[in-house]
Amino acid sequence: MNAATEVDVVVIGAGPVGENVADRVVQGGLTAAVVESELVGGECSYWACMPTKALLRDAAALRAVRALPGAAAAVTGPLDAAAVLERRDRFASGWDDEGQVAWLRGAGIGLHRGHGRISGPRTVTVTAADGSTTDLVARHAVVVATGTRAAVPPIPGLAESRPWTSREAVSARQVPGHLTVLGGGVVGTEMATAYRALGAEVTFLARDGVLPNVEPWASAQVVETLEASGVRVMIGAETTEVRRDADGVAITLGDGEVVRADEILVATGRRPNTDDLGLSSLGLADGSWLQVDETLRVLDAEDRPVGDGWLYAAGDVNARALLTHQGKYQARAAGDVIVARATGAPVHDGPWGRHAATADRLAVPQVVFTDPEVVAVGHSTASARAAGLRVRAVEHDLGAVAGAALHADGYRGRAGLVVDEDRGVVVGFTAVGPDTAELVHAATIAIAGEVPVERLWHAVPAYPTMSEVWLRLLETLGR
Ligand SMILES: Cc1cc2nc3c(=O)[nH]c(=O)nc-3n(C[C@H](O)[C@H](O)[C@H](O)COP(=O)(O)OP(=O)(O)OC[C@H]3O[C@@H](n4cnc5c(N)ncnc54)[C@H](O)[C@@H]3O)c2cc1C
Ligand SMILES: NC(=O)c1ccc[n+]([C@@H]2O[C@H](COP(=O)([O-])OP(=O)(O)OC[C@H]3O[C@@H](n4cnc5c(N)ncnc54)[C@H](O)[C@@H]3O)[C@@H](O)[C@H]2O)c1
């Protein structure tokens, strides 16, 4: 064992969230070291956000061109799947983290490669690939940013069938002839869209519905487009057994039907990377999601900060919002509050305070890059009502807005607002339609800013843009 190395802050996990926490504390004048067992940059850079969007982008561009007669005339061939995969490789940096390591170095952050495990108060033991160990002792804080991995449900035969998880789907060298996708959440729906566009036959086993957490009218349009593209969407289908044989995989459904495929992608959610992190030595359960307070300090079973508050958890591992941008938002709050607590500066941990991750509960934006795109921020109508809010929901046909009609012939889409009637503010926004991604930020600002609906009438959308749907939604609400 080497002598212990002292540093102000130790971060376990160098995904987008860990990198950002470390950067923030260094910018605040402290020293930081990160521990990474795989690639600096994490899931997002190599097996999630970036490569998935590269897999989806060419097909979206092609659809956009085909919706304009003049431009469509210039397109004569099908999608070149090999070229899409080659571009995907570039967006995954060839699964090489040299660029991100150089960034860490430039930011003045120390890197320790190996598996990090909490071995005592403020102490992390790093076990390198050669088995050697180093102890890192943090003067102020240890931050867990270890992310998640795919959860494989206990369906008989599934684990033994060498299923694809998101990692294999994102990094595949070839497009399978027939892909079955298990799970109708965001990963499953994006990958069903991508692989169908790349030429695979796709069976989509969406037991609990397709994108079940978004407004039903948005989900319905995605289902319609998937089916029109040739995907077999099986809502409600229960999978009872999976077997791999020489011809691929055989998937037995609850009604006895056997679906055959070359590969099965398991996209049924995530589990936290906390199994071998030393949590039990702190009285927490190994393998559990980490509960945190608004400043990202890990809480024990009695909702008290662990120890004297030296342990933090940011990003996917705390289950607040499994999204890169939201994890990086937490990283800014956690990094800044660690600096404030270390230097005795005031802590602003009230709602919307500089050191509180308030938006995690009220204004989380998401763009699902399906055909068509689904964007949402804040509440859906159902989640607002479940939260006990007295809300009014309004919708409008996006295709009837001049900007959308110009954007593509036959444009189909819809947008909706959820308004808190007691406070007179927007608490939710959803849109579905081609190229709606950029619509979401205006809604995020309205929700995070708690802008009164009355004032939104003065936020005039430019003509002719899709944002005019805001005006139509306000008109539907009435003044
Ligand atoms: C297929 C897919 C597509 C996605 N697309 C999007 C998207 O378009 N937009 C979006 O916002 N989000 C997307 N997400 C979610 C996004 O990937 C995560 O929210 C994000 O990666 C979380 O960042 P993180 O830093 O918390 O964790 P991760 O990115 O998982 O990074 C954690 C890091 O910790 C390391 N680590 C784990 N345990 C240890 C240990 N004990 N010691 C040392 N190192 C350790 C891991 O090797 C990893 O590098 C997608 C997810 C998936 C699966
Ligand atoms: N564009 C994006 O922002 C983007 C893209 C991909 C992933 N992500 C993030 O990654 C996270 C993980 O995504 P995900 O799709 O893996 O998880 P998810 O939780 O979104 O969806 C998993 C789905 O699998 C279903 N399911 C669970 N067990 C099942 C079973 N045994 N059989 C059939 N279906 C089952 C669930 O009902 C659920 O609908 C999400 O929280 C999402 O925010 C974001």
Image (cartoon, grey):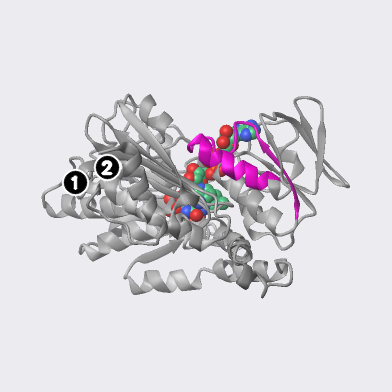
Whether residue 471 appears in magenta in the rendering, the answer is: no
Separation of disc 1 and disc 2 at Cα? 8 Å
Quadrant of the rendering where the N terminus is positioned: bottom left
Name the residue that disc number 1 marks: 353
Q: Residue at left 58%, top 43%?
A: 221
- Judged from this view, the residue extending furthest toward the right is 246
**Residue count near mark 2 (Cα–Cα under 10 Å), binned few <14, some 14–19, many ≥20:** many
Name the residue that disc number 2 marks: 358
Some atom of ligand 1 lies within 8 Å of the CB belonging to the residue at label 1: no
Q: In terms of depth relative to the viewer, which is nearer, 378 or 6?
A: 378
Question: In the drawing, does residue 295 fall left or right of residue 14?
Answer: left
Q: Amino acid type of disc 2?
A: Thr
Question: In the drawing, does residue 325 fall left or right of residue 295?
Answer: right
Q: In terms of depth relative to the viewer, which is nearer, 184 or 414?
A: 414
Q: In terms of depth relative to the viewer, which is nearer, 215 or 118?
A: 215
Q: Give the magenta range.
A: 200-227
Please tell me in which quadrant of the rendered image residue 90 appears: bottom right
